[in-house]
Amino acid sequence: MTDRDIFDKDLLAACISCGFCLPACPTYAMTQDERSSPRGRITLMRALETGRLDEDDPTLQEQSSFCLGCRACETVCPAGVQYGALLEQWRDHQWRGRHVPPAALALRTGMRAKPLIEAAGRIRGAAKPTGPARPDVEAHLMLGCAERAMFPQLSKAVLRLLPDAVDVPSGQGCCGALHAHNGDSRTAHRMAEELGEVMPGVILTTAGGCGAHVAQVLGRERVRELSEFLLQYWGEHPDRLPDLRRLTVDGRPVRAALQDSCHLRNGLHVTAEPRELIARVADYVELPSAGTCCGAAGTYSILRPEDSQRVLDIHLDEIEAADLDYLIVVNMPCQRQMINGLKRRGSKVRVLHLAELLASAL
Amino acid sequence: MSTQGTTSRLHSGPGLPADVLAELRGFVGDQHVLVHDGDVEPFSRDATPLFRARPDAVVLPATTAEVSAILALATRRGIPVTPRGAGSNLAAATIPEHGGIVLVLTRMNRVLEVSQGELLAVVQAGTTTATLADAAAAKGLLYAPDPGSRTVSTVAGNVAMCAGGLRGLKYGVTRNYVLGLEVVLPTGEVMRTGGRLWKDVAGYDLTRLLTGSEGTLAVITEITVGLLPMPATSSTGVAYFDNLSDAGRAVAQIIAQGTLPATLEFLDNRCVNAVEDYAQLGLDRQAGALLLFGDDGGPDVVAASLQRMADVCTDIGARGVTLAQDIAGSEALLYARRCSLPALARLAPITMLEDVTVPRPKLAEMVDTIDAITAKHDVTCATFGHAGDGNLHPTVVFDPGDGDARHRAEAAFDEIFHAAMALGGTITGEHGVGAAKRPWLAARLGPDQLALLKRIKTAFDPAGILNPGKLGS
């Protein structure tokens, strides 16, 4: 059988099938089923590549979509398999024609409408674009697509934390991360490049998922996630470090925990920085599953709401047991996921983005 | 692999009969019987490179009663059954070479008991080794066997393969901790062997016979393991030698003077350089061998033990000796050993990790022999392993697209296995025989012992349905 060139040959060959990824995978944890493990999925990808299975096979369709794409498997892989890239290639091929999940198609189309995204940001009151990118700033703040419309307060909070250090270039669309994760990585690549042209130099992002995608296309050195940027910038410019007060509720220190963003943790390898910043203003609590996917997984919560909820429930149980005041997130989809989940449970825990938390301590 | 002996009477052909599938679905529920091509494909391989065979069906039972019903049916209808845990074994022991059913035990994954008073734990088959160890540690107890795959592998898989690990010299391997088993015979009978007793000599020691039986005699559904008090502390040191002979002499001297270290691991020069290329730890690239030594126990005992071992290494003429100052320092030293596999696996797409074992004094000679054989066959190989056990992991990497690389690797391993046996060693120390090492089993055991294995196999499995083609089939 000849290979079908669906996958990058070297990436697909790298897996040694040792199975070390199994315990890291949230869907394997749910099912204890090899089919829904990273190794099992790579075995399926290889069967697709060699033609032993074709794209009409229902298991291929199901597993390509059941995977959260969290990339936790990459962090424990002894062979350095780039699973996230393989998943994108798989979905590029798998999610075509009648195999595209309708919601994925709708999201892909919607987020390409730049004027609409810009209008939503204006109406919702996100940070105002400041015109063409300025060469004299430390970084350009990226507004995001859905973030601008759903959490407009995040970009404003960043500007309060970093007065004069960043600008907000006009003409920003979606970065394309959504497209990369939903079977259209070619468009995704182009969108990140377009964003890079609007924002030459360092791009500052408040979303781990967007950051990892933009870094993959433009290079890691072009991207700074908020927490790593703040620590670096304040470290280099102590005079710009604001006076952050320690937050209290009912006269006692706030108890706050972090929910990692998977692509921030597993893609950009930023883990210590958000924890350090939270600890500056609150009593930091490490949740047992802080580093595992919350089930938002970009658009997964829209495409597979029931599975997303099963993944989320583990986190909600831990949050309720930890006697928290705030749960801190560093990625927009996680924020939406956690707000909805905690609301459904009637929890009093507030969900805040790191930018909001720090801005509230000014 | 040829079909032989009792396996020739087995069902073969595409798919299982409809009435068999209907019965299986009745036992475990529709969603736990997989038959479609895509559904069974992921179960066509384990962690062993180059071995693959697609089963006709995959069945995932949740209870011992379900396992019993499945096996009784399989014996009645002559359907091959290959038991599987997490599929992390390196001997192709879970490859269904004769098709039939792959029986996956991962849904049975509960820790049933950890007893401080009795120093034991009871777990279901599919519990991972790390889950068992963590449950024991939460009560201040140690589950000593620590195979490299411990986060992935299941306890039943460890027992079936008699898994080893890094602590073998001081603590032994899986077989030393299995007190009792609940197993299902291929004919469906549920049986308990051994129990909760450290002393029990009533009957043949079936618990030991089943340990390492590689899923050919019975399906393990529950395991009772012995635990130890958790050592108060541990520490590690590293020594570099000009060559492996010196490292081998240091190992012999350490043991001869009465120390039984918890850790005694070595990396050869190629392995040191691969690790250094990968992780930049500041290792001595010129060294012929790196020896990691460590011990656990009370703080004073550990400190004295580490100093004694360091002194031996210095006396032998080590190029350099370093003792870790704290836990973090120990972890940093052990990291060199831990990244051996990652470092080597990144060199080429195929990584063949073998595990010949020789008497401890022959360690250096065996490594030299491996170097000579792999050089002769133009094969890229690095060796690391458990020096205290004489257990070597010669690791060959190659690109399957590179002409006859695979055949050169296989030819080299054939010579390596025979060389190990000639030194009084064995073809596998801890990975198992499976399908991968089956061609060399006769040479290792001899005709009389192999014939006895076949008679034992028939006594347990008259229809020859369990993991056909492996061990005594």
Image: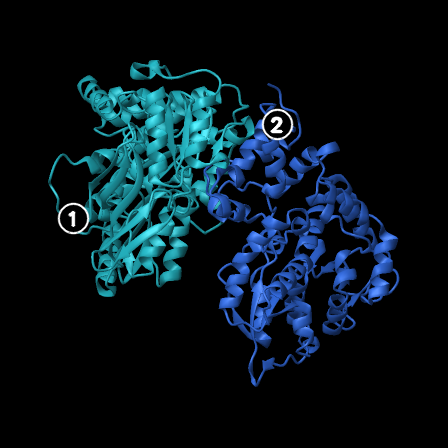
Return the residue nearer the eye: B15 or B302. B15
Instruction: Name the residue at 22% across, 38% down.
Output: B360
Which residue does the numbered mark 2 point to in the structure image?
A49
Mark 2: few, some, or many residues within 10 Å (few <14, many ≥20)?
Answer: many
**What colouring method underlies this structural image?**
by chain
Which residue does the numbered mark 1 point to in the structure image?
B198
Instruction: Name the residue at 36% across, 57% down.
Output: B330
User: Tell me, what hue is chain A?
Assistant: blue
From mark 1 to mark 2, how far is it between C-alphas?
53 Å
Mark 1: few, some, or many residues within 10 Å (few <14, many ≥20)?
Answer: some
Quarter of the image where one finds residue A340:
bottom right
Residue flagged by tag 2: what amino acid is it? Glu
Q: Are marks 1 and 2 on the same chain?
A: no
Residue B191 sits above or below residue B56 on the image: below
Return the residue nearer the eye: B357 or B321. B357
Return the residue nearer the eye: A95 or B420. A95
Residue flagged by tag 1: what amino acid is it? Trp
Position of B142 compared to A192: left or right? left
Position of A288 compared to A133: left or right? left
Question: In the image, residue A132 lies at what x, y percent?
Answer: 88, 60
Kind of element beneath mark 1: loop
Which chain does tag 1 point to?
B
Kind of element beneath mark 2: helix
Question: In the image, residue B68 lies at what x, y percent?
Answer: 32, 33
User: Tell me, what hue is chain B?
Assistant: cyan
